Amino acid sequence: MATRGQILKLGILGGTFNPTHIGHLIAAEEVYWSHRLSMVLFIPSYLPPHKGSKNLAEARHRYEMVRLAIKGNKHFAVSDTEITRKEKSYTIETVELLLRQYGGTCDLHLIIGADTVQELPSWKEIGRLASLCRIVVVNRPGAGLEGFSQLIPVLGKEKVEEMQRMSVQIPPVGISSTEIRARLREGRQIKYLVPDAVEKYILKKGLYRDVQSNAPT
Ligand code: ATP
Ligand code: MG
């Protein structure tokens, strides 16, 4: 945390974390070191605006899996701010809340995978969001760089150039939560794709064994 007079360089990694996997952890760790951040805050969403709740584990499970995944890493933390709002989770609202909490001493770095770049134009108040934080993109297998040019009319050339400059090259991780859920439905193993504690939690609670349509609580 920042002490008096210091700027807190806060990384934020939002997502459904359904479940958390090593791609999330590697992305956050690489950006932490690359941009010399103070810490990275993982923020599980309650209801993601762009995904349905089909196959979405309950919010408390997803929160717990993030907590278990980051345990022992002193510069990672998890926030329940979106989960406790119990509404659709819009990043602009979370960012405004964080800025109110930390005041003007906070330099927010929103971390996203390259697949998310193409979704940004449809995000709520994306122009204002982009003016309130830096956006740090990490590479992800299967996601190219096309998204950046589509962003120019939305965010302007200067902001997109800043995003390109700030982007961080990570060891490519071809893992997604979608694939992990599919493996679990098929009864296949997920060892090493998620931290051990997350694997244990999934198996203990019997998560993702069937197609679920439960509302997140
Ligand atoms: P799903 O398949 O359910 O969409 P996911 O693996 O994409 O899950 P999310 O919780 O949607 O995980 O991702 C949260 C953020 O982390 C997004 O910005 C996403 O682009 C990024 N991310 C997730 N997995 C990776 C990965 N393997 N490499 C780089 N970025 C990733
Ligand atoms: Mg995703």
Image: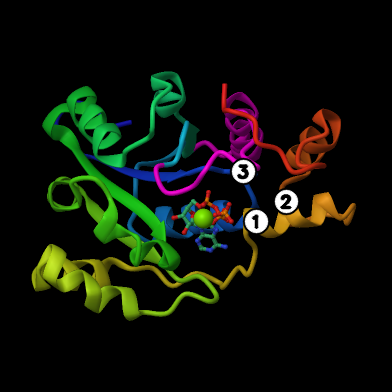
Q: Which residue is mark 3?
A: 18
- The label on residue 178 is 1
Q: Secondary structure at mark 3?
A: loop
At which x and y percent is residue 188? Answer: 88, 56
CA distance for labels 3 and 2: 8 Å
The answer to whether mark 1 is within 8 Å of ligand 1 is yes
The answer to whether mark 3 is within 8 Å of ligand 1 is yes
Task: Give the residues drawn in magenta, as a range.
Answer: 49-74
User: Is residue 144 visible in this depiction of the protein?
Assistant: yes
Q: Secondary structure at mark 1?
A: helix
As drawn, 43 above or below 100 = below
Q: Are marks 1 and 2 in contact (CB under 8 Å)?
A: yes
Q: Which residue is mark 2?
A: 181
86 displayed left or right of 71: left
At which x and y percent is residue 67? Answer: 60, 31
Q: Are marks 3 and 2 in contact (CB under 8 Å)?
A: yes
